[in-house]
């Protein structure tokens, strides 16, 4: 069974998680039982006694290779990958639910609620999500209350590198919002449609979201509605527990350009024209820097096609070299 069945272990909710380091700590000669303790999926076509056959590592691994507690942040990040983050999960669709249930069980064992698994139809869209590493702030309102203020996006600043299959980074042009549809933008907590904070169609009072574009980027100012979760959010923002923002968007046809940076060995994407801004969200810090980088289906396909085209000449060259070598052997 490709998705490794649920097993219950203690859960570490305090430590950060470094997936590549945890995987490296597992000895290369580790047996199948050890590997199945650390991961949530195994390739049925691979060798189950090799690390290369496994994905979704989510357990702490000591320096001497001992697999320990499940790591809460790793489980959340793995679910984010199932939901399209970091380029998505390169596993069969039929395996997604089993992997999710494995990870979700650990989160529930910690007494917490796991993020929902997005349906495949939800992932086959051009909607994308990015997180901005710029703090949100609380400001005093004229009536003695407080509002949340910050930038949902900033122009001419390179993002971090994200994408598993085809790594890339991107930058937003100053004119990218000129023709964007921002007629009905909602402010959410963690992009959860069940936790609305404000909307830019509300003209005044609680629930009002104001958006403005300046030479830095898209600035927002929101006065949350009088709900329990909004009050909790304000407390968390005030204390610095929740301190970042994110936005969901789609790109217009021919609204971006992509090139390959030979020096860095990655693709670089410039967004010149947004089609629509769906929401801006106040978000908690992700376990990985690019956990909230959800790449749209069209953008993924475009990058993958470019990568195949870039590699094709090298493959053809190797084939021609092999053909010549075989011809020489026949002489």
Image (spheres, rainbow, N blue to C red):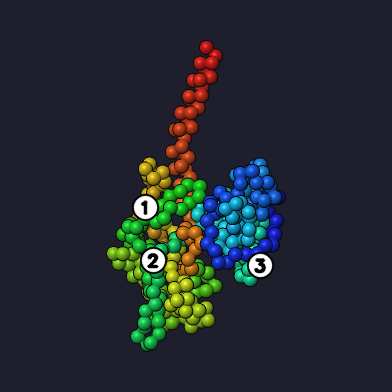
Q: Which mark is residue 270?
A: 1
Of badges 1 and 3, the one in the foreground is 3
Q: Earlier in the sequence, mark 3 or mark 2?
A: 3
Residue 207: x %, y % from top left: 44, 79
Residue occupied by mark 2: 134
The picture places residue 283, in percent across and down from the top left corner, at: 47, 68
- Discs 3, 2 touching: Cβ within 8 Å: no
Looking at the picture, does residue 162 appear above or below residue 186?
A: above
- The answer to whether residue 7 is above or below residue 269 is below
* Element type where label 2 sits in the image: loop
Looking at this view, name the residue that lies furthest to the front: 64
Mark 3 falls on what kind of element?
A: helix
Label 1: how many Cα within 10 Å (few below 14, some 14–19, many 20+): some
Q: Can you see residue 215?
A: yes
What residue is shown with label 3?
A: 109
Residue at horizontal 40%, vertical 71%? Answer: 136
Q: Position of residue 195 (x, y in %)?
A: 52, 74
Kindly report which numbered mark, 3 or 2, lies closer to the viewer in this rendering.
Answer: 3
Report the residue at 39% width, 49% height from top.
268
The residue positioned 35% from the left and 66% from the top of the image is 218
């Amino acid at each position: 069974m490709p998705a490794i069945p649920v097993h219950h272990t203690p859960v570490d909710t305090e430590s950060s998680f470094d997936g590549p380091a945890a995987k490296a700590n597992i000895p290369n000669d580790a047996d199948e039982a050890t590997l199945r303790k650390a991961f949530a999926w195994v390739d049925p076509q691979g060798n189950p006694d090799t690390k290369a056959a496994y994905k979704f590592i989510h357990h702490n691994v000591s320096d001497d290779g001992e697999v320990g507690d499940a790591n809460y942040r790793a489980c959340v990040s793995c679910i984010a990958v199932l939901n399209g983050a970091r380029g998505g999960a390169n596993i069969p669709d039929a395996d997604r639910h089993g992997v999710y249930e494995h990870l979700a069980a650990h989160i529930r064992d910690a007494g917490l609620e796991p993020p929902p698994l997005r349906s495949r139809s939800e992932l086959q869209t051009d909607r994308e999500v990015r997180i901005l590493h710029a703090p949100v702030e609380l400001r005093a309102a004229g009536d003695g209350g407080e509002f949340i203020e910050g930038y949902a996006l900033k122009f001419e600043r390179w993002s971090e590198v994200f994408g598993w299959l085809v790594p890339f980074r991107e930058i937003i042009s100053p004119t990218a919002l000129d023709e964007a549809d921002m007629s009905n933008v909602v402010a959410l907590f963690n992009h959860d449609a069940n936790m609305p904070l404000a909307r830019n169609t509300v003209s005044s009072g609680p629930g009002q979201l104001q958006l403005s574009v300046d030479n830095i980027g898209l600035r927002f100012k929101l006065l949350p509605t009088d709900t329990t979760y909004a009050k909790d959010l304000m407390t968390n923002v005030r204390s610095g527990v929740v301190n970042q923002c994110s936005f969901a968007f789609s790109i217009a046809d021919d609204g971006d350009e992509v090139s390959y940076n030979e020096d860095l060995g990655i693709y670089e994407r410039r967004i010149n024209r947004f089609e629509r801004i769906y929401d801006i969200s106040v978000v908690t810090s992700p376990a990985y820097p690019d956990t909230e980088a959800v790449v749209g289906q069209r953008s993924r396909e475009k990058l993958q096609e470019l990568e195949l085209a870039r590699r094709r000449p090298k493959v053809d060259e190797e084939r021609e070299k092999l053909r010549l070598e075989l011809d020489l052997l026949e002489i």
